[in-house]
């Protein structure tokens, strides 16, 4: 293969190596980018300014910015006097989503709208937007169903449809558990525990709360609501001392509620604790911090219970309690099942005291309205039948009263068979909690192992890419070294070619010298013959011999135009004598001078480096310019 072809091949290899190196660098960059991209929310510095938030969010790519934006929108919606900032941020993200044709933005917008409507108490519309988010969100695998199950379950709960609320809570709980989403697992377990607590199933409530605590520890966040609910269970089941102990243990969380909902829950729990300690005056003052006008509908039964507790110790307690229940019957109707669970002792006394407070028709209508929820709670059904028995007894219908009491006993036995009270099922609960914690530990270990494997795979890939990059660099350097070697070889070849050209010229010169030598020998032989043939020393013959000898002396070994230039300088007067000669070119003037000096055509050809024919043509041209005859000898011009 020729040197130039090898150099071309090496140049192509170098370009390929550089291209591979660029691809390796791109691969390393992508791996590092993907590793650093796992926690997008950490890139956002929390602020209450829409412009400040959007400056950070707009730098995130599609698939990242949507959830981050709507988390911030949800947070802003719960801050007083920040509606303008909320609406401005919402406008920014909707404009970007519309520009990109991004349906994810619409899903998160529906979710955010649903939460906003829940916050403002418009539950029907909140449910509609939640369902829209669910229908559209199913087509996106990167949008967790937990995002839209939550507002749907809350809306159903506030609308009194507890069965659907629990159904969506469990769907969200199961999905969060399946994908190891500890943040949503914490939320859903807390909500389910709250539901079971409100329905008197304290063991199930405790199981969910314990799982929520474990998930919160994994997630690094234990909510105020969760701690309040755990305290409520212990207050109901285990007494004041256990409640005080837990309150002190979690005081750092309970003393810093993040929103109005948590504040009201904390205040109501503390009122309950003060009442259990017989600190009535403190409890009454604290209860005034949650007036009816600002009370969250979630707490209406809890507050009724605390107010009735406070009235129960005062003079004319039954009359006062009856008036309070009558004025708040709309609360009781809204959440009749929970009311039966928490207020049954008061309601039995008040119906006996004032049967018109809850007449039979009202009880039957409320039973129909809450049929789905009552069918899931045997204890609530038992308490309802006790109220029916009281009403029938006041009406004198003792047979029906006895039937209702019998039904109440049946429902009580049914509840007792499934009763999961902490006291009655302490051993079972400990075993169940241990199993849950063990499973969570296993999940944590598995998650940690997966994380380690992912990190190891990433490190190995980066290492392989770096090794590949180093290999490419070594190959490139070797290739460059070969190129340098080829360049050196090319230089050496050029030198060799130059030497060969010099040797060829030297051989040509030697050949010319030999040729001239032969010519001189021939001329010498001719002169010898001429001298031998001379009979007398004729002057003309001697002059001819002299000129022949001068011509032989002037014959050089090669082209030597400098000789002609020297002769032109020596015969400057001759050139001035014939001004027309100046119109000739340099070569023609050289031929003129050499001709005048007596050189023959063959000698002039060797000296000037032109052909004899060219010399003949030039001489004819000169004769024409100078007006000379053909018979004239050139030497005569001198």
Image: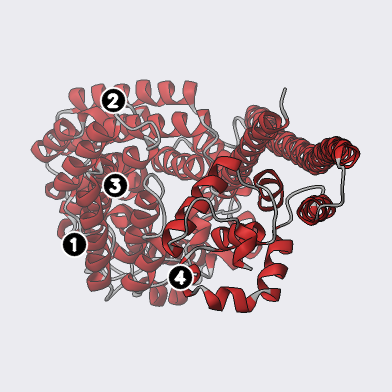
Residue name at image x 56 percent, y 35 percent? 207
Which residue position holds label 1?
Answer: 323
**The quarter of the displayed image where residue 360 is located:** top left
Residue name at image x 67 percent, y 38 percent? 14
Q: CA distance from mark 4 to mark 1?
A: 148 Å
Question: Image height check: is 290 above or below 143?
Answer: below
**Mark 3 secondary-structure assignment:** helix
Upstream in the sequence, badge 4 or badge 1? 1
Which residue position holds label 2?
Answer: 375
Residue name at image x 73 percent, y 37 percent? 472
- Within 10 angstroms of label 2, few (less than 14), some, or many (20 or more) residues? some
Answer whether labels 4 and 3 touch (C-beta < 8 Å): no
Q: Quadrant of the C terminus?
A: bottom right
Q: Quadrant of the N terminus?
A: top right
Kindly report which numbered mark, 4 or 1, lies closer to the viewer in this rendering. 4
Q: Is residue 280 left or right of residue 350?
A: right
Q: CA distance from mark 3 to mark 2?
A: 35 Å
């Amino acid at each position: 293969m020729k040197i130039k072809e090898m150099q071309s091949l090496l140049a192509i290899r170098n370009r390929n190596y550089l291209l591979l190196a660029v691809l390796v660098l791109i691969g390393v960059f992508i791996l590092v980018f993907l590793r650093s991209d796992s926690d997008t929310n950490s890139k956002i510095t929390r602020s209450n300014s829409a412009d400040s938030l959007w400056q950070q969010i707009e730098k995130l790519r599609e698939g990242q910015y949507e959830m981050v934006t709507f988390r911030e929108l949800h947070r802003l919606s719960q801050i007083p006097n920040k509606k303008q900032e909320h609406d401005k941020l919402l406008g920014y993200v909707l404009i970007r989503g519309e520009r990109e044709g991004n349906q994810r933005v619409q899903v998160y917008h529906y979710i955010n709208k649903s939460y906003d409507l829940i916050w403002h108490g418009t539950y029907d519309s909140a449910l509609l937007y939640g369902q829209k988010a669910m229908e559209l969100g199913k087509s996106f695998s990167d949008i967790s169903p937990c995002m839209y199950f939550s507002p749907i379950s809350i809306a159903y709960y506030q609308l009194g449809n507890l069965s659907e609320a629990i159904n969506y809570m469990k769907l969200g709980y199961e999905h969060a558990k399946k994908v190891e989403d500890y943040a949503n697992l914490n939320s859903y377990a807390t909500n389910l525990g709250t539901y079971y607590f409100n329905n008197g199933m304290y063991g199930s409530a405790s199981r969910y709360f314990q799982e929520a605590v474990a998930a919160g520890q994994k997630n690094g966040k234990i909510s105020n609501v969760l701690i309040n609910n755990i305290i409520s269970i212990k207050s109901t089941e285990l007494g004041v001392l256990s409640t005080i102990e837990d309150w002190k243990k979690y005081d750092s969380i309970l003393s810093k509620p993040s929103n109005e909902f948590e504040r009201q829950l904390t205040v109501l729990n503390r009122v309950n604790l003060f009442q259990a300690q017989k600190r009535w005056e403190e409890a009454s003052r604290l209860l005034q911090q949650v007036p009816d006008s600002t009370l969250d509908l979630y707490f209406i039964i809890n507050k009724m219970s605390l107010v009735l507790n406070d009235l129960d110790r005062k003079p004319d307690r039954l009359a006062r309690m009856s008036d309070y229940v009558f004025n708040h019957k709309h609360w009781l109707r809204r959440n009749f099942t929970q009311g039966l669970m928490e207020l049954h002792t008061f309601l039995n006394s008040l119906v006996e005291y004032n049967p018109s407070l809850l007449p039979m028709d009202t009880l039957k209508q409320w039973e129909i309205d809450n049929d789905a929820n009552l069918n899931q709670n045997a204890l609530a059904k038992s308490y309802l039948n006790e109220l029916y028995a009281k009403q029938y007894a006041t009406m004198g219908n003792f047979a029906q009263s006895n039937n209702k009491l019998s039904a109440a006993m049946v429902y009580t036995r049914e509840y007792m068979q499934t009763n999961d009270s902490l006291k009655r099922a302490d051993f079972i609960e400990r075993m169940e909690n241990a199993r849950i914690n063990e499973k969570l530990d296993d999940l944590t270990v598995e998650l940690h192992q997966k994380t380690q494997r992912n990190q190891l795979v990433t490190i190995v890939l980066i290492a392989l890419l770096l090794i590949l990059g180093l290999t490419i660099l070594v190959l490139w350097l070797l290739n460059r070294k070969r190129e340098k070697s080829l360049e050196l070889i090319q230089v050496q070849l050029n030198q060799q070619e130059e030497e060969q050209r010099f040797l060829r010229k030297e051989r040509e010169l030697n050949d010319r010298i030999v040729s001239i030598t032969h010519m001189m020998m021939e001329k010498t032989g001719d002169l010898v013959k001429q001298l031998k043939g001379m009979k007398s020393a004729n002057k003309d013959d001697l002059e001819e011999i002299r000129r022949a000898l001068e011509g032989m002396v002037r014959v050089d070994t090669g082209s030597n135009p400098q000789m002609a230039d020297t002769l032109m300088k020596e015969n400057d007067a001759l050139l001035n004598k014939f001004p027309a000669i100046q119109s000739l070119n340099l070569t023609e003037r050289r031929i003129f001078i050499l001709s005048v000096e007596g050189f023959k055509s063959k000698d002039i050809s060797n000296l000037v480096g032109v052909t004899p024919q060219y010399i003949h043509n030039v001489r004819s041209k000169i004769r024409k310019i100078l007006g000379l005859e053909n018979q004239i000898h050139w030497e005569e011009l001198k």
